[in-house]
Every structure is written in C-alpha cells, then in structure tokens.
Amino acid sequence: MFKYFMKRFGLMLITFIITVFIYFVFIKLIPDNHIQVPGVGDDWYEIYKAREGWDKPIPVQFWYWVRNIFVDGSFGFSQYLMRDVSDAYFGKIPASIRINIIPYFLSIPFSIALGVLAGLKKNKLTDHIISVGIMIFISIPFFVTAVLSQYIFYFRLGWAPDYKIATASEFQELGFWYGISTYILPVIILTIVSIPGFARSVRAELTEQLTTDYMLLARSKGLSKSQAVYRHALKNALVPFLPPVFIGIIGILSGGIITEQIFRVDGTGRIYLQAFNSRDYALLMLINTFGQFLTLLSAIVGDLSYTIFDPRVRFGSGKLS
Amino acid sequence: MRKIDKSKLKLLHNKNDNINDAPLKTKEIGYYKDSWLRFKKNKASLVAFYILLFIISLVIIGPNLKIYNLPDQSSTDALRLGNLTPKIPFLEDLGIFDGSKTITRGKQFILHMNEVEFGEGIILSEIPQELIDDPEVTSLTVTVDYYKYKNYITSYMPENYYGILLSNEINDLNEDPLGGVRRTIDEEQFQEYLEKNYIIDILTIRETPNTTDPNVVYYQYEVRLDQFLLSLDQTPEDTYFWFGTTNQGEDLFTKIWEGARISIAMALAVLLINTTVGLVIGAIAGYYGGLFDLMFDRFVEIASSIPFLSVLTLLTLRYGTATWVIIVAFTATGWIGSYKTGRMQFYRFKNREYVLAARTLGAKDNRIMFKHIFPNTLGLIVTSSALAVPAFVFTEASFSFLGIINYTDATSVGMLIQQGQSVMATHPHLLIFPSLYIAILMITFNLFGNGLRDAFNPSLRGVE
C-alpha cells in the first residue's frame, strides 16, 4: 500500500517538475526587453539581473529561480509592481477564500439533497423539475448567470445593496453589516451554480445503486424501501463523492477569475488578469506554479482519501500498480 | 484469399426439396437507424434539435438579413445612431420592443422638446402639470420614442444645450450650444439636401470670396440636418433595429450572428483537428502498442497536466489573439480527449475474434483498422463531438468575456456581453440579447448532445 502510494507520488512529482520547467522555458522565450529610463539610475535592474540571472541561459535561470525559492522564499521580482511577486500574490489569497468558502460548504448539502431526491423520485415530477433546473444551470455559462443576476437584482429590482462586493474602505465607512450584505448576492449565485454538476452525479450514482442486485436482496430479505435505501444504497452512492469534497477545499485557494472580475473581488483571480494584461511574467510564472502545485496537492489528497474511504481501492491496490 | 477451381465444387441442394424458410418481411434496422429512432423518442432532445437547426440556419443567414452598412461607410454617422433600443415590426403594436425608453433629463430640455415642432411625438408619457409648475423640480422622467429622441438630439438640439448655455453664463465663455448639430455644407450639398428635404432649418449663410473668379460668390450654409434621413434615408418611424444598436451604432442583431458564426466555425475547426489528430495517434498507439504506446502515454500524461489557461496565456502573450492562435491554443492539448477514446477502443477491439478472423483471411493492418475497428469507435466520437462544440463555445465566450481572448479582427459574443456589462445600467439591451443567445444555444446544444449520447449507447436500449 505504502509502496504503491509512494510510486504514485513520485510520478506526480516528476510530472509537476517537468510541467513547471516547460512553462518556465516558454515564459522566458517571450521577448521581454528592458529599456532604461534616461537620466534615472538603474540599480535595481542590475541587482535583480545578478540575483535571478537574467543574462544567463534559460536552464541556469531556472536553477536560480528554484534556488531563490528555497533560500529566500522569493518567486521572482516583478518589474511592473516593483516588488517581490510572492508578497503581492499570497496576500490576495484570503480575499479569494472569503468569497469562495461559504458557497462551497453551502452547495454540498444542497446538491446531495437535490441529487438524492431526484434519484429516489426518478421519472416523477420532482425529478423532472430538478433535472430541468440542473440542465439549465449547467448549460448557461457562469459569467452570463452572474452578470444577469447583477442586472436583475441590483439595477432592475434594487434588492442587492451593490453589484460588487464592498472594499475594505467601504467596510469602514458604511459599516460592517453593509459590507456583509454585499456578499449575499455573489454567495447565492456561486452556490447556485456549483450545485448542478454535483447534484447530477449524485443522482446518476444513486439510480445506478438502486438497480443493483444487493438492493434486490435487501428488499427480498424484508427491509422496507426506505431502510434499504438509507442503509445500503445511499452509503454506497455517496462514497465516490467524499474525495472530491476534500479536493474541492484545495480549489478554494485559487479564486475563480470570472467571479472576481464580475464582483470586483480583490483576490487571486483578478491579480491573474492584471498580470496578463500588464505582461508581468514573473507573476504569471508564480501563478502557474502555484496552480500546478494545487493540482498536485489535490491529486495526492484524492488518492489518499480514496484509499481511506473506499475499501475496494485499499484491498485491490496491489493489482492497480 | 486462395483461388479455388469452381469445377471442383458440387451443389448438394436438391431442387425438389421444399424450402420452408420465408424471407423476413420487416425492414432491417441498423445501428444508426436504431439510434435515430431512439433519439426521436426523447422529446426534449428532439425539440432542442429543431431549435438548434433554427439557430444554425440563423448563424448562416443571420448576418445578411439586415442590409445596413453605415458603420463601414461613415463611423461618425453610425456613432450618432448608437445605443438605440430594440424595435421589431408587429411586436411593437403589442407594446414590447417598440423602441421606447424611460429617460431622465433636465426639465427645461424636456419641456422645450415637448413644445417645438420637431419634437412632436417624442414624449409618449404624460407629464404631470404639478411637476411642471413646481419650481423645485429640475429634472423630469419620461418615456420617449427613443428613435425619435435620438434623432432630436443628433439633429435638432444636443442634450447638453442648456448645460452649455449655463456654463457660458457662469464662466463668461462663448461656446456654441448648438455645436453638436450644426453642419456646414456647400452650395451643391445644400441643393441636394434641399431637394431631399433633409434640412430642418438654416442657421446662417456665409459668403466666402472666391479667389479665382471674384464675380462668382461661394456660399456656405450652416444648417441643421435630419440625421436619420441623412444617414439612413428613413424617418425614425420606419427604422427598425430588431435588437437595437451597439454604442458604435452597429446593428446588434447582425453583430450577434456574426459573433456566433465565428465561434461556431472555430468550434468546428477545433473539433475537426482534435478528432483527426487524436484518433490517428490513438489508433496507432492502441493498435500497435509496444514502446511507442508506452512513450506516448507518458508524454500525454505530462501534456494533459498543463492547464488550458496556461497554454492560452502563453500563446496569446507571444502571438497576439488572431483567430488562428486561439485555434492552436484549443488544439494544443485538446486532442488528448479523442486520443484516449481512440486508443482505448483500438486496444480493446484489436484482440477480438472478428479481428482475428479478418486477419486470418489476410486483411492488412490498414483494412482492419479502418474497416473493422474504426466503425466501433464512431458512435463514441459522434457523441463526444456533439458535446465538444458547446464546450468550445462555452470556454471561448468565457475567455473573451474576460478579455484574455480579444480578437483584433472580429467581435465574439463574449466580447459583446462584456461590452454590454459595462453599460448595463443605461443600455440593458446590449447585455440581455447576447446573454439570451448564449444561454439558449448552450441549453439546446447540451440537451441535443445528451440525447445523442443516450441514443448512441446501445446498452440503454429498452431501459427507459
């Protein structure tokens, strides 16, 4: 078991390093000329050139980059923000978590409830209504839902206090409760759009479990339908969804670009767009590495939680490798 | 196949024997026929399919339905017709899409518009007398025929007329309050416009001395022209923009279908490239296996772990955002999906008995791959393709909404929504129509794709 896990982990780590390196090479291949401003000293440029090896071959630069991460905790110097990118980026994570965490934990019970309800009432009116809702919200792009909700609830009906979330200064000026109330609209929208995908898989999994032989056995040995469902089918149907729940927690760390752009959240998604628009290569490199790291982390967590929650994986692990 | 001499064969069947077998009367139902029959049973998907056909036909003919090339001829004239509200023939009689709009403007301006002859019929709602009499009320909210209103402010009196008068008075300036509508034309244009009845009134006539021939005097006319007649040769009553106009004065209806045409054409191109490349490589890897398969699978594992956003970012930063760059970005790692399908299917079927039989009969690898295994993968490809098109449209719209995809040579629907979002408080039609288009397209495409997937899955036959 341990051996299998270490093997998986090693492969993932190698893939991670290779992809980060590939990205680094491509970033460095993009022309990035520095023009010295006339009459102004350029000391910082010389300092960082020496530190990050801007005049050296790309593999050497990569080595410098990795060394700086481990020695100083520095992910590179941004020529646009004129500061170290790690301060600029990691400081934005709390804002992203604030907007993402409540919708995430709200959406899980809702989607399980809706999925189970639709699965139990398959092909009845309840199921049809839920399925239509799922279909609609899965199809319409998130940004359309979000923008239309802004238009309807702020500009048309005036229910929401603002179409964007309150900034720190607004929190101080207009009070804490006003600030919280601006979060209501985005939180509701984010919850609604994250329900359908999950609910649909729960419904599919449950309907599959309900038609299995062991359910027939449970009914024939005298369990009532609800007993059979709650003691057997539901347990088995929900096991595959536990690992994604844990993986999703990691996903909270990286905020959605679309959410943050529409609701003006000063988080990691917006800083990505800023980096993209100002061609801040050092920052882009950090964001990509961090994103890849999160992917790696969620793969590990996924593997671990599958082995913990699903005995089939645990006992069959010898064959899998 | 070995050649056998026909003379060595002998017919054993006795002609007098009675054959009791009768040929089947029913028609044969093949895999595709059966799929179509089962697809038709799924009502929601069938309706979605017809709506989709309608949308696709609009994508093809939509951009040419309205002949309106003012933005190409004169962008300044088009700009004067910007942000018009939607107006559709017949529906306007029902009180929807009648080109009306509720606006709030200065009281003096509204009242003046209500009185002058050119402003006749602009204001649709009643102005309460007590508001007119109340000196503390400085602005009025009225419902106007926005087409006529637009004509009024672009050809008769600019919206900031009284603002300029006031600032002239305070700052002791001499700015022309009618500057926005005053046009200077020469004799020839004057005669032409006079004939066509474009001229509302003449503000001044100026004499300019002719240097070459002092006897003939040049006249310059400063006039107010009817903007709609001038640029469209139509009165505001006869002008219809079904979905309204953008802030540049372009017809939104045409714009949406042009954007739709681009995104769907690109989706098909991406789909074609991804499927072809993925299938060819997948077929070779799956069928021949061995070292190539092993090496390639490692490569795919690394390539598939590169996020799409990274690929897109790198390519657009390096090569800009022409359409071909976006296609490359979508195909760079997009073929992996169909590679996996192809590899899996070829790997699965290559050791089946019927393939063995074909090989025993002497069929070459090419023939086995195309004739025997490929048809088995076709169902999977069709269903994944039906869902790949909306997936592309979805992603493309999202990224062009964010500005990461920003075509220099075209306007996609995502860009339209982004432009609409920035003015949604004042011109909501610019947001609502593109959003509705994309919402309807995505819902129908997904319903259709799901129906197709179920229809092509033989294991579901008889279950529902």
Image (cartoon, grey):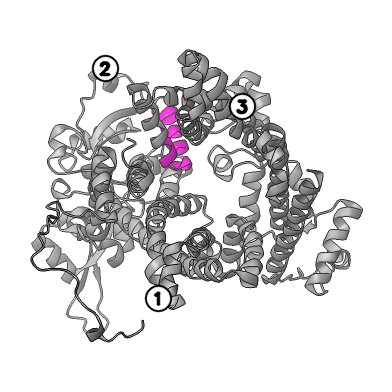
Question: For residue A319, which numbered disc appears in the image?
Answer: none
- Residue at 39 percent across and 36 percent down: it is A135
Q: Is residue A222 left or right of residue B79?
A: right
Q: State which quarter of the image contains the N terminus of chain B.
A: bottom left
Residue type pointed to by label 2? Glu
Task: Quickly name the residue at label 1.
Answer: B361
**What secondary structure is marked by label 3?**
helix
Q: Are marks 2 and 3 in contact (CB under 8 Å)?
A: no
Point out the frontmost of discs 3 and 1.
Answer: 1
Question: For residue B130, which numbered disc appears in the image?
Answer: 2
Q: Residues within 10 Å of mark 3 (few under 14, many from 20)?
A: some
Q: Residues within 10 Å of mark 1 (few under 14, many from 20)?
A: few
Q: Nearer the viewer, residue A285 or A316?
A: A316
Q: Is residue B341 left or right of residue A102?
A: left
Distance of label 3 from label 1 (alpha carbons) = 61 Å
**What secondary structure is marked by label 2?**
helix
| Residue B20, magenta (yes or no) | no
Q: Is residue A211 left or right of residue B309?
A: left
x and y percentages locating residue A290 in the rendered image: 72, 50
**What secondary structure is marked by label 1?**
loop
Q: State which quarter of the image contains the C terminus of chain B.
A: top left
Residue type pointed to by label 1? Leu
Q: Are marks 2 and 1 on the same chain?
A: yes
Q: Are marks 3 and 1 on the same chain?
A: no
Find the magenta span and give its range. A137-156
Chain of residue at mark 1: B
| Residue A150, magenta (yes or no) | yes
- Looking at the rendering, which quadrant does residue A20 occupy? bottom right
- Residue at 17 percent across and 48 percent down: it is B236
x and y percentages locating residue B322 in the rendered image: 47, 68
State which tag comes first along the sequence, 2 or 1.
2
Question: For residue A105, which numbered disc appears in the image?
Answer: 3
